[in-house]
Image (cartoon, rainbow, N blue to C red):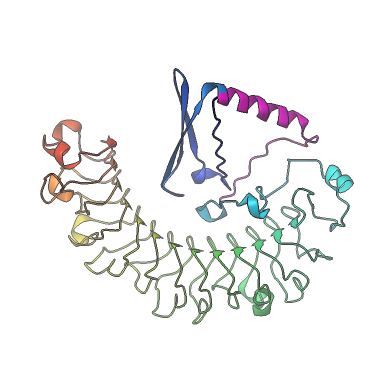
Amino acid sequence: MELAVFMAVVWVGSGPCTGSLYLHIDKQYISTIITIPRLCYSITMVVQVSVLSLVLTLALGLMLSVCRPVCGTPGTTQDLDYGGVPLWINRLLGEPSVFSLRGRMDRAWYRANNPQSCPDLCDCPIQWPSALYCDHRDLGELPDSMLYNTQYLFLQGNNISSLPSSSLTNSSGLRWLILDDNRLQTDGLQTSTLQNLTQLQYLFLNHNKLTVVPSGLPRSLRQLRLAHNLITSISPGTFGNLHNLTLLLLQGNRLNVITETDFTGLVSLNLLSLSGNLFSSFPSHLPPSIQQLYLSNNSLSGLGEESLQGFTNLRYLRLSRCGLVSPSLHPQSFNLSSLVELDLSYNKLTTIPLVPLTLQYLYLEANHIQEFNISSFCREVGPLSYSRMRILRLDGNKMSYHLLPPEWVYCLRVLHHIYI
């Protein structure tokens, strides 16, 4: 008897975070390789199912698609990136798997099949009774008669410029609040508005007009997305109570310095994105708990010996398009045994920097490198002394395969792909 293995992977958004799918058919089995670009996460998943199981699965999917309720305009594609990092959906908790219902189903069908009341300009799907979809409705303010049981509120793509304290009085159970692509300004966001949302876990405020990080954030918050605003500073104590925050997106703002108290309180932060700001040097006073740090698209002067000191958990570091030159990198800049992936693409490097033996993914494409130095990867080569490098990108440099020294295969003995 053959067993079918099912794996569901959900991406939220499109553009740079869209994954790619490859099928390789080999007699009885089909290997499916799903990859996600490093802009989102460095993940490669391999799923193997039998041909018979795949055929049965596709047939079942076709049957289900035919039997579902009549849809409206199918498959509208929306250019939404939600801050450049996909959101993983936990369906076991009843979390909605789509961020918008536009073009997915006729609104009249929702209202005819849903016994509960729903604000006039919103949709209340019966499959997610605690979700309220009011996105892309040209709203200037939050709708009246908000449902008391709303846990997932989608308000992206409107013209909302303020959130008065009375606007979410009846929504204390909110878990997600999505306000991307509005016109929110700092003076229109009252402290008490968010402070009273004691169950809030995800707050999306990307693509607005905020000039400072909002204050009065609830301590329940796990993700805060503030990408592409006008933020120039972080007020003291803003993150003091956010001990549960694991993700903070601040890319595409106007920050140029991080003070000693700016990130105080972020003891659980896992991912921090500061790409596309105005930093001229590697920022100090970052939370030591960080595992993923994104600093691309800043004009950095270089990295010193102590730039990464204290980051014992750091695994992914992105420094592409920072104008880095080889003399500005201290030889011990990346001497961090926890580092798994390092992105130095699209800089002005002329030599390969020293990297730890434990590094697995190194992106150096589109630099000015002319020479392949074995010592950059292996200070010595032996039975237990070799690089764990799996993917090495050197394409777009001034190199070719015939310039590789013959002994490189002994150092990079577990390499899967090299691009030159």
Q: In front here: 300 or 93? A: 93
Q: Is 63 part of what is drawn in magenta?
A: yes
Q: Is residue 248 magenta?
A: no
Q: Is residue 388 visible?
A: yes
Location of the N terminus by quadrant is: top right
Q: Which residues are magenta?
A: 53-81
- Exactly how many numbered labels are in the figure? 0
Which quadrant would residue 295 be assigned to in this image? bottom left
Q: Position of residue 313 (x, y in %)?
A: 35, 63
Residue 145, position in %: x, y? 84, 65
Residue 225 seen from this side: no
Give the vertical position of 232 relative to 41 (above or below).
Answer: below
198 vs 26: above or below: below
Of the pair 200 and 216, the residue shown nearer to us = 200
- 254 displayed left or right of 411: right
Residue at 19% x, 62% y: name it. 332
Name the side, left or right, on which 183 lies relative to 306.
right
Q: Residue at x 38, y 56 (%)?
A: 296
Rendering coords of residue 28 (x, y %): 47, 19
Q: Is residue 133 above or below residue 144?
A: above
